[in-house]
Image (cartoon, grey):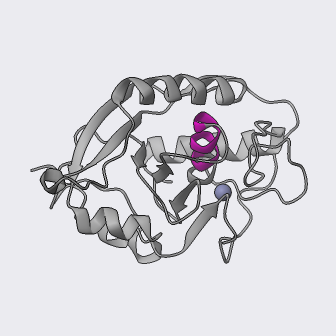
Amino acid sequence: MRRFHLLGLGVALALAACGGPIRAAGETAGPAPGPTSITTARISLPLSLYVVRDSDSDTGSSLSSGRDERGLRTIAEGIQEIWNDSGIVFEPVVVHTIEVPRDMISDLAEGRSASFLRAAGDRFEVPDPGAVNGFYVSFLGGVNGFTPQGSRVFFVTDDPSVHDERVSSHEIGHILGLHHEPDDASRLMFSGTNGTLLTPSEVTVARYDAEGILDGTG
Ligand SMILES: [Zn+2]
C-alpha cells in the first residue's frame, strides 16, 4: 500500500488557525523578498481535494461533510482564479470522497488534526494525494480553515464565514510559506475576510516554496 506522506508531523499540533482567534506561533520569515518584477513562468502544482465523510454514519447521525465533488471542483476553479497572477497553476486537480473514522472527524471538529494526519493512508485511504491536499469537513471547532504547520494539508469547514475559494486559497498560502497579514483586509493572508490580493514579495515566496515542494527540497 502506498503510504500517504503529508507531513512534518512533529509540528502538526502547531496550527495556523484562520478566521478564529488562534495565531500560529513561532512564525519566521521566508526567503528574503525578491525583486518587484515577477516572473510568471508557470509552476504546475498538483492539487487534491477531498470530501470527508463519516465512515460510522449508519447510526443516523453523521459528521459527514455536506459538500460534494462537484462543489470541490468549483472551489478549485476559484482557487486558480485567485492565484492566477502568481503563475502557480494547480494541476492536475483531482477530487475524491473519502470515508474517515468518526473519532478522527470528532478530533478535527475540536480543532485537533494529529490523529487524522497520522492515520491518513493507514486507517483510511487517501487516493491520489497531490502536492497540496485539501480536506473539506463538517466542522472545525469554529474556525474557517487551518493548515497544520509544516504540512501540505489544509482543512476547510462546511460553513466558513468567508467564500469557500478564499478560505482554501488562504490555506494554500500558508502551505506555500506565507504568514498572516495583520493590517490590510484586502490581502489574501489577512485572516477572516474575503481579501484576495497577493503582494509581489508573497508571490516570490510562494513560488519559491512551490518549486521546493516539486523538487523535493521544500
Ligand atoms: Zn491563516
User: Relative to the observer, which residue lies in front, 30 or 79?
Assistant: 79
Magenta part, dominant SS: helix
Image coordinates for residue 150, horizontal then vertical, percent: 51, 64
| Residue at position x 64%, y 37% in the image | 163
Instruction: State which region is magenta.
Output: 164-172
Image coordinates for residue 18, horizontal then vertical, percent: 64, 58
User: Relative to the observer, which residue lies in front, 145 or 213?
Assistant: 145
Taking the image as drawn, is residue 58 in sight? yes
Query: In this rendering, would 55 be left or right of 204?
Result: left
| Residue at position x 69%, y 53% in the image | 178
Using the rendered view, name the quadrant where residue 131 is placed.
top left
Query: In this rendering, would 103 be left or right of 163?
Result: left
Taking the image as drawn, is residue 117 in sight? no
Q: How many marks?
A: 0
Whether 198 is among the magenta residues is no
Image coordinates for residue 82, horizontal then vertical, percent: 68, 29
Q: Is residue 174 above or below residue 10?
A: above
| Residue at position x 74%, y 64% in the image | 29
User: Relative to the observer, which residue lies in front, 179 or 183?
Assistant: 183
Query: In this rendering, would 185 be left or right of 139?
Result: right
Image coordinates for residue 123, horizontal then vertical, percent: 15, 61
Residue found at the far left of this picture: 1
Q: Is residue 140 above or below residue 89?
A: below
Q: Quadrant of ligand 1?
A: bottom right
Whether 169 is among the magenta residues is yes
Q: Is residue 187 above or below residue 143?
A: above
